[in-house]
Image (spheres, rainbow, N blue to C red):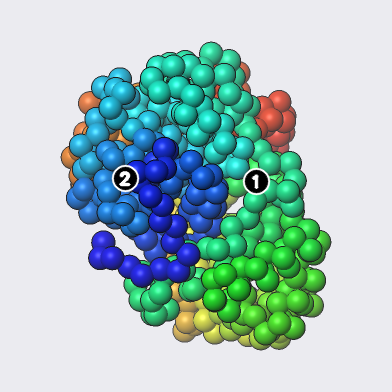
Amino acid sequence: MKRLLERNVVVKDWRKTPVKVALVYPGGYRAGMTGLTVQLLYHLFNLREDTLCERVFLDGSKPPRSLESGRTLRDFDLVAATIQYEGGYVELLKGLRDSGIPLRRSERGDRHPLIVAGGPCVTANPTVMEDYVDVFAIGDAEPFIERLVDAYRENRSRKGLLEVLSDVPGFYVPGFTENPVERAWVEELDKAPHPTAQVIPLIDEGSPLCPVFGLTLGLEVTRGCGRMCLFCLASWINMPVRHRGLETMLGIVEEGLRRTGVRKVSLVGAGATDNRWLKDLCQHLVSMGIEFSTPSLRMDLLDRELMRLIVQGGQRTLTLAPETASEEVRRLIGKPIPDDRLLEVSENAYEAGFKRLKLYFMIGLPGEDRDSLEGVGRLVDKLARTGFRDIHVSVNPFIPKAQTPFQWLPLASRSYLTEASKLIRRSMPKGLNVRLDILKPAQAELQALLSLGDRRTGRVVEYMALSGGGRGALRRAMKIAGLRLENVVYRAKEVEEPLPWDMIRSSDFRLLKKLYRKLESELVR
Ligand code: SF4
């Protein structure tokens, strides 16, 4: 990537700083700099005087180089990768290959950097990558930084370091960890560090490199979500939901705006609407004349006053996730929002000044039938009648995720998903400005495999990385790995059968079982 000018870049002296960390994002700059994860990790590592941290975006450059000093991954002591989506596994291995680092951990030695991975995907199920990653950080990022760097400084031999880390809470070290790993988490967000000197690219907002929400200060309002929908990974691996207090948030805003020079804030957190200070925060931002944007909002908690404030903050797109057109299916998946409530929210939002509506639906959900699929078009039509003329409908196959109560469910078959997509497409109201995007079943298949697979699935990732993917690559890779999709993604699992991720306790397994059994009994009724 061409050298980019940025504000708040941290450049440290390579000769004087003992620990060098490459912070790897398996994707391009725009995606990586949207959201707070890269900013937070960059801040946390660089807070330590003995550590320098540089960002490496795996955007296809060969070899990938750090933005700060142009060094390659081989030059660093630690490679810390944050995996936000399963496709990141393939990108990570491509990045190692292009850096001349052996992909398999068994082929790496003391002269290679230690490969560490964290993020929601590995917190749910790290086993897919356990032949490739040396150390997994299970849970929130904050508790790991000190533990990792301290251990690294005390143990220069790879084996010694891995042994030590395997005894540190939250780390999963394949080949060394013997007992189940409990997720590490921050109890009070108010006491956790939050970056204020965030890195801001000095580019035009129209640039293809500009983060998705523009040049903004990211503010994490809430971690997790109190709704706990049964399919939702973000809530189950972040329980209990935690909030930042008003005073802390205002402090971050004040200092953050001063240090970044931006005039816009993006509020972060799946369950931001749960935060009881959200309205006060929005009110303050409005009174300061600061623009802000919010993530997808909970329909059960969204009232007129909050909507008015959000519009005053400059946001014109309302994002809602009804998930399905059927009230009964919504109840089964743990999101019992009635249609009337949806329509009321939409009506109020239009009145408040929202101009665009973005809707998320899933297909292949338990309890779904033809009527609920065709109902998507009817529901969109009703929502359009509340006033919206610009509607974007996004449909994704439901992908069961490890560590959620739906982890035992299968992915719906390709033929079912294809047929369901057609029904939804046909059901769309004519003559309205509705944009419809549907994720292809083949993409869902790969995502499900990487979510639900075991150690052998890693060979599939390796094949995809080395072969460059392409048509038929997944089937070929499965054959080489000796795996059948039918067994991994298209089969409902028995509740008592061993799961690849049993070793990882990111969620409350007893509760997951109870909720899944309840669903099973409701489905056979
Ligand atoms: S409301 Fe949204 S973020 Fe919260 S649990 Fe449900 S799907 Fe997840």
Say which of 504 and 149 sits in front: 149
- Whether residue 124 appears in this view of the structure is no
Query: Is label 1 in contact with label 2 (beta carbons under 8 Å)?
Result: no
**Mark 1 near ligand 1 (CB under 8 Å)?**
yes
Q: Residue furthest top?
A: 178
SS label for mark 2: helix
Q: Residue at x 68, y 71 (%)?
A: 254
Tell me residue 16's x, y (percent): 39, 43
Report the amino acid beneath label 1.
Answer: Ser
For disc 2, the marked residue is 91
For disc 1, the marked residue is 235
- Whether residue 16 appears in this view of the structure is yes
Tell me residue 433's x, y (percent): 47, 82
Say which of 237 and 443 sits in front: 237
Q: Residue 170: which quarter of the image?
A: top right
Q: Is residue 369 placed above or below 287 in the rendered structure? A: above
Q: Is residue 488 placed above or below 224 in the rendered structure? A: above
